[in-house]
Image: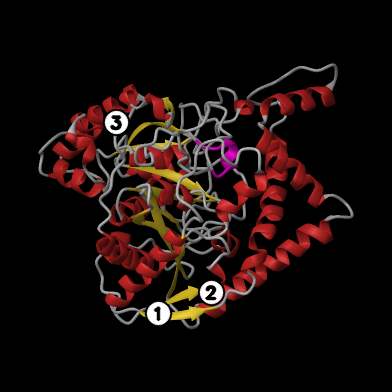
């Protein structure tokens, strides 16, 4: 494999600037890596011709001195983002070979800054899952394996393809989305950096909807600085998204390396979950020690409604999914299975088109929104959601950020929780609160378990204060010196 695929996004951009190699050479190296990594099943659609065309255009811009912020950087795009003229299916059979005639705002921003598209990345169907096993294209396999083991592990979900592709050095970075932890949990399970920005920081226009009040786009990258570079390009106000925030986008990379001396970091006592592996507890304590050494003040805080977060999330998210997915009826686009009449056509199309997990969530969502249950479930869940947001508000009166584990375990074998939805949902125990409150959260790789599998630490910040997360994340990254890489078996 070419050494060009081993570069970070930052070093690749510097190499392009210094003319050490061209965008075409960089893109060819990544296309070769993708071709050799078929067993991972990270990409569901490769676009080599488009990638080389974009790379040639990038080299031409650079020759004229007109390079953008990400000019020539080969990226992978989660299949939830609509890409003009390129199949976009949300990894569901129901969308068939849907090819959008428009570009999502987030990907349009990346192309504006000169990035190159390598293809579309695998994911859980409609972003519903924590292990990337619900995809119509089959599961993604984590490039990491336990020491001396050959068991196939999950890369996490729903952005499993994004995390696996970055960890396996198939792209310099990837777009992802996070509804209840779908950026941060896969990042933790693959030794990559993932940030879910403040709700409204990145436009949702052109991103296939799961739960509209929770969905947020963000990047997965190899380093904290790479994630900062990507988020700076991805973010920005979009009048086509009514929830998009009309605020300036800072230069996030400028926060990496800043002193964190005097910052107050909260440790939520409710995140010390029963049965949490000792390795994760130890890593958390190590993270606290690193931040103390950097001059942070550590403060214990309480988020008393944390225990209600998962139940509230699994009412709100399926309710919104039930509403959003009602549009897939076989009438306008995607799969259509004809029936004897209109109702039967709807039923057959949706029965054939949706996978088991998506059906489960649609049924839950339809139930909690139905007459007689709306007040008992949905309304109550929204009230709990407000209490969770209030807990964070009170905590942020005393601290600048929070430090927690990202996931309750390292990567687990594919199929392990497949028959137990509740066990699968518990993977999101540390992440869903952040979505319910609309806050930014970041996962940084900070160590490995006894089998050599990566573990992540999560930082949670105030709304629109991603800058503090990049500063603190940079400190953890430097202190951890995380340099482990998956051993190539594919």
- Residue at screen point 40% across, 54% down: 455
Q: Nearer the viewer, mark 2 or mark 3?
A: 2
Q: Nearer the viewer, mark 1 or mark 3?
A: 1
Q: Quadrant of residue 262?
A: bottom left
Residue under label 1, please give it: 298
SS type, badge 3? helix
Spatial separation of the CA atoms under disc 2 and disc 1:
12 Å
Q: Earlier in the sequence, mark 1 or mark 3?
A: 3
Q: Residue furthest right?
A: 372
Q: Is residue 361 above or below residue 473?
A: above
Residue 474 in the image: state x and y as whole percent. Answer: 29, 63
According to the image, what is the colour scheme of the structure?
secondary structure
* Near-viewer residue (266 or 16): 266
Q: Which residues are magenta?
A: 123-130
Rendered-image quadrant of the C terminus: top left
Q: Is residue 405 visible?
A: yes
Residue under label 3, please give it: 54
Q: Earlier in the sequence, mark 2 or mark 3?
A: 3
Spatial separation of the CA atoms under disc 2 and disc 3:
49 Å
* Residue 76 left/right relative to 94: left
SS type, badge 2? helix
Q: Is residue 124 magenta?
A: yes
Per the rendering, the mark at residue 269 is: 2
Q: Is residue 466 visible?
A: no
Q: Is residue 430 magenta?
A: no
- Residue at screen point 34% across, 50% down: 230
Rendered-image quadrant of the N terminus: top left
Q: Earlier in the sequence, mark 2 or mark 1?
A: 2
Q: Residues within 10 Å of mark 3 (few under 14, many from 20)?
A: many
Question: Which SS does the magenta portion mostly show?
Answer: loop
SS type, badge 1? strand
């Amino acid at each position: 494999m070419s050494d060009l695929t081993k570069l970070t996004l930052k070093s690749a951009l510097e190499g392009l600037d210094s003319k050490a190699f061209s965008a075409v050479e960089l893109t060819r190296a990544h296309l070769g890596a993708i071709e050799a990594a078929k067993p991972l099943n990270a990409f569901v659609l490769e676009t080599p011709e488009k990638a080389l065309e974009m790379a040639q255009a990038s080299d031409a811009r650079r020759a004229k001195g007109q390079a953008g912020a990400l000019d020539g950087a080969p990226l992978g795009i989660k299949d939830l983002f609509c890409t003009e003229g390129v199949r976009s299916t949300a990894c569901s059979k129901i969308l068939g070979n849907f090819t959008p005639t428009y570009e999502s705002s987030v990907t349009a921003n990346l192309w504006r800054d000169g990035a190159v598209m390598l293809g579309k990345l695998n994911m859980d169907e409609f972003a519903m899952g924590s292990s990337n096993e619900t995809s119509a294209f089959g599961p993604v396999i984590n490039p990491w394996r336990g020491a001396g083991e050959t068991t196939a592990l999950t890369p996490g979900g729903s952005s499993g393809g994004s995390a696996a592709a970055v960890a396996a050095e198939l792209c310099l970075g990837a777009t992802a989305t996070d509804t209840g932890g779908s950026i941060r949990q896969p990042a933790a399970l693959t030794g990559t950096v993932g940030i879910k920005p403040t709700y409204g920081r990145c436009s949702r226009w052109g991103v296939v909807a799961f739960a509209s009040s929770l969905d947020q786009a963000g990047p997965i990258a190899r380093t904290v600085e790479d994630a900062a570079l990507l988020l700076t390009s991805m973010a920005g106000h979009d009048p086509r998204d009514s929830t998009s925030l009309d605020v300036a986008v800072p230069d996030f990379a400028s926060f990496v390396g800043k002193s964190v001396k005097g910052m107050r970091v909260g440790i939520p006592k409710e995140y010390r979950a029963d049965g949490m592996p000792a390795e994760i507890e130890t890593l958390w304590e190590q993270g606290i020690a690193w931040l103390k050494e950097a001059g942070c003040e550590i403060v214990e805080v309480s988020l008393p409604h944390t225990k209600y977060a998962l139940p509230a999330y699994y009412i709100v998210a399926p309710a919104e999914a039930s509403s959003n997915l009602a549009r897939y009826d076989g009438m306008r686009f995607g799969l259509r299975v004809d029936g004897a009449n209109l109702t039967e056509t709807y039923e057959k199309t949706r029965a054939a088109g949706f996978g088991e997990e998506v059906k489960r969530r649609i049924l839950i969502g339809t139930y909690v929104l139905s007459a007689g249950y709306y007040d008992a479930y949905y309304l109550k869940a929204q009230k709990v959601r407000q209490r969770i947001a209030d807990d964070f508000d009170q905590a942020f009166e005393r601290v600048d950020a929070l430090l927690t584990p990202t996931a309750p375990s390292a990567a687990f074998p594919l199929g392990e929780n497949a028959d137990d939805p509740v066990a699968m949902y518990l993977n999101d125990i540390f992440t869903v609160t952040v979505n319910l409150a609309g806050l930014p959260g970041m996962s940084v790789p900070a160590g490995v378990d006894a089998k050599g599998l990566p573990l992540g630490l999560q930082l949670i910040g105030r709304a629109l204060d991603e800058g503090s997360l990049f500063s603190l994340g940079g400190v953890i990254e430097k202190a951890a010196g995380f340099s482990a890489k998956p051993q190539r078996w594919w």
